[in-house]
Image (cartoon, grey):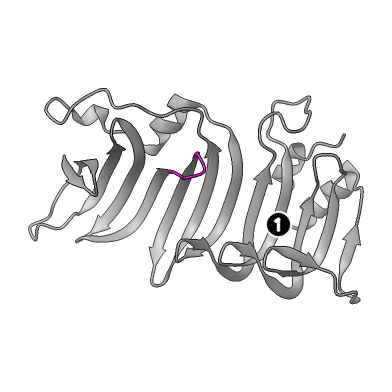
Amino acid sequence: MYEQNGREVYFLGQYNNSSQWNGLCILNVYNGDSLETILEGVYDNGSLFSYRRASCESKGEWLITDRVCHTGYNSGETWVYTKSSDFKKEFTADDVTDVQILGVTELLKAKNEVLLSYYNGNTSGGFYNDDTGEAILVKYFPPNTVASSAEVPVIRTLYKGCFKDGDFHDDSEDAWYITRGVDTGYMYFRGVFIEGNAKRQETDDEVFENNLSKEQIANYLKRYGLSEYLEQFIIK
């Protein structure tokens, strides 16, 4: 254990002959008795190669990431879950054992939280930043927001395209989303997105459809290779 910025940091891992972190290393960071961050990092002579991370966000949510590090950006996945309660430390620096150092999987199993969003794409500077056009963001309605007869999360928005500083941002007219409000049906839009919003351009390549049926949604998802999400689109 060591202290950093007023936090207790518990380290489980190994050093190489140059005293650099090497191989799989796990960090658990506690603010008082409450778990704040888990990092499962794979290091090569002190340089982070890939990692899984769970962190408690200021909005009271768990941010889970599984990423590979590249020069200037990271690639991989990000999940955001509800945070129903704190995870409390039940040991001290004097009696901690290696089995009490948590991994990301153990945290999720212990808390059984609800998925709020999923992102698959590149990040940089702490934001979703991806100019490939292949990044995907799925946003779900919070619990008890919309009625659902199935025990599955209900998709609010599924977007595929480019991102800039965390927002939908794509002027190629190839980006698209399927989205709905609490009291509306699903709509489909393919076209230009600027700073998180769809921008109607009234061009021949732009497509807009409202009040989609389940069959229409299925056809769009099949076209883009995302049929696994069909059952999470709940039609009222």
Check the picture and name the quadrant holding the C terminus: top right
Q: Inspect this view and state whether residue 163 appears.
A: yes
**Residue 145 falls inside the magenta stretch:** no
Could you tell me which residue is drawn at 41 percent across and 32 percent down?
A: 107
Could you tell me which residue is drawn at 20 percent across and 31 percent down?
A: 98
Image check: 132 left or right of 173? left
Q: Secondary structure at mark 1?
A: strand
Residue 31, position as x, y percentages in the image: 30, 38
Check the picture and name the quadrant holding the N terminus: top left
Query: Quarter-wise, where is residue 152 in the image?
Result: top right
In this picture, which residue range is highlighted in magenta?
56-60
Which kind of residue does numbered mark 1 sit on?
Answer: Tyr
Residue 225, position as x, y percentages in the image: 72, 54
Could you tell me which residue is drawn at 61 percent across and 45 percent down?
A: 117
Image check: 130 left or right of 146? left
Find disc 1 in the rendering and name its residue: 159
On screen, residue 223 above or below 152: below
On screen, residue 142 above or below 222: above
> What secondary structure do most residues of the magenta stretch adopt?
loop
Work out whether residue 225 or residue 88 is closer to the camera in this orientation and state it.
88
Residue 2, position as x, y percentages in the image: 16, 43
Residue 187, position as x, y percentages in the image: 86, 52
Q: Inspect this view and state whether residue 226 appears.
A: no
Work out whether residue 227 or residue 152 is closer to the camera in this orientation and state it.
152
